[in-house]
Image (tube, rainbow, N blue to C red):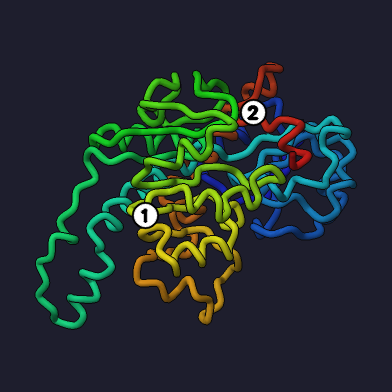
Amino acid sequence: MKIVIDVAAHEPALAALRQRADCRIVCLAPPEERAREVDATLIADADVLFCTFPPTNHAAMKNLKWIQIASTGYTQLHGLDLPARGVRATNARGCFDVPIGEWNVAMMVNLARDCRQMIRNQDAAVWDRSAIFQNEIRGLTVGLWGYGGIGRETARLARHLGMRVHVMTRGGVGPRHDVFTEPGTGDPEGVLPHRVFRAGEELEFLRDLDFLIVALPLGKSTEGLIGERELQALPRRAFVLNPARGPIIRQEALLRALREKWIAGAALDTHYHYPMPPEHPLWKFPSVIFTPHISGSSLSPKFKQRLWEIVSLNVERFVRGDSLLNELSHAELLGA
């Protein structure tokens, strides 16, 4: 089995893979996190591709059976016609559950206590002990729109902090198998939410939240999912957190919600441009915490270790003919 690798190596895991008698390893140099054309002689007979973005000449890989990508998002696989080619694909679900779950908690505390204003006060040497800076999140309700790994780890942390957890999903909540999860994290059995809402109950879900956290992948069914109707359904005390993908929330609707104070504020880690232009109005709102897509990234300290653990486990499963961790469905690969 020939495996082509186009990501940065985690040397212990790569060394173990090289020792397997049933694997031939080709590492492309330097590894890239963007699409590029690769020498066809290196990839034409590959069975497995481990990358962030498939090469632009991926069609040359006539023997390809499985792609493992080094990201949770998988829009880079849309349009490659993988189901018709008989190619399976897996992503990096689970690598970012811990850091993004922690980002969600940090943002809820920062928003509730208006830490942005306290930092401005510090910079201006202003002594202000107002009650707004002393709020608690214990007893508040967080709504998770989507309940994958990030939603489940956030739910676990929120429960420990004494929050109520509401979840909005299309098909309900239950056990989650064949998905990579850091031991001791998340909600593998699907038992943590206090209340679960399903399709058609979106406005009821939104009506009594203190925090709305977007925890959905971006696809045809989720792009622009949250607009004026949804933002107006939130209580004016509510904060919106988006560590998922910017376009899931309609940009103009979010700007209007902030300008007209339909919501109390927002924490945004995913955006509408990369980088966001300095003149964009979202930089200027005093009630918005704006981070540059760092809630979880390939620079997270344990990302490489977790990613290569997924690869190692999946190689074992692939050789045995078992189901793979984090396998993407045909609908997901087609962008449904």
Q: Residues within 10 Å of mark 1 (few under 14, many from 20)?
A: some
Please name the residue that numbered disc 1 is placed on. Answer: 236
In the rendering, at what x and y percent does residue 153 appear?
40, 35
* Location of residue 112 with respect to 68 vertically, above or below: below
* Residue in view at x 67 percent, y 17 percent: 322
Of residues 183 and 224, the one nearer the viewer is 224
Is 146 left or right of 159, judged from the image as shown?
A: right
Which of pointers 2 and 1 indicates the residue nearer the eye? 1
Residue 83's image quarter? top right
Is 290 left or right of 325, judged from the image as shown?
A: left
Measured Cα–Cα span from mark 2 to mark 1: 49 Å
- Marks 2 and 1 close (CB-CB < 8 Å): no
* Residue in view at x 75 percent, y 50 percent: 54
Please name the residue that numbered disc 2 is placed on. Answer: 315
Q: Residues within 10 Å of mark 2 (few under 14, many from 20)?
A: some
In the rendering, at what x and y percent does residue 268 appear?
45, 59
Q: Amino acid at mark 1?
A: Arg
In the rendering, at what x and y percent does residue 259 appear?
45, 69
In the rendering, at what x and y percent does residue 89 appear?
71, 35
- Which quadrant does the C terminus fall into? top right
Can residue 320 be seen by looking at this rendering? yes
Q: What is the number of the mark on residue 182?
A: none
Is 139 left or right of 328, judged from the image as shown?
A: left
Of residues 145 and 218, the one nearer the viewer is 145
Q: Amino acid at mark 2?
A: Val
Residue 262's image quarter? bottom left
* Residue in view at x 53 percent, y 38 percent: 202
* Chain-order first, disc 2 or disc 1: 1
* Location of residue 165 with respect to 273 vertically, above or below: above
Of residues 288 and 43, the one nearer the viewer is 288
* Residue in view at x 49 percent, y 53 percent: 231
Residue 155's image quarter? top left
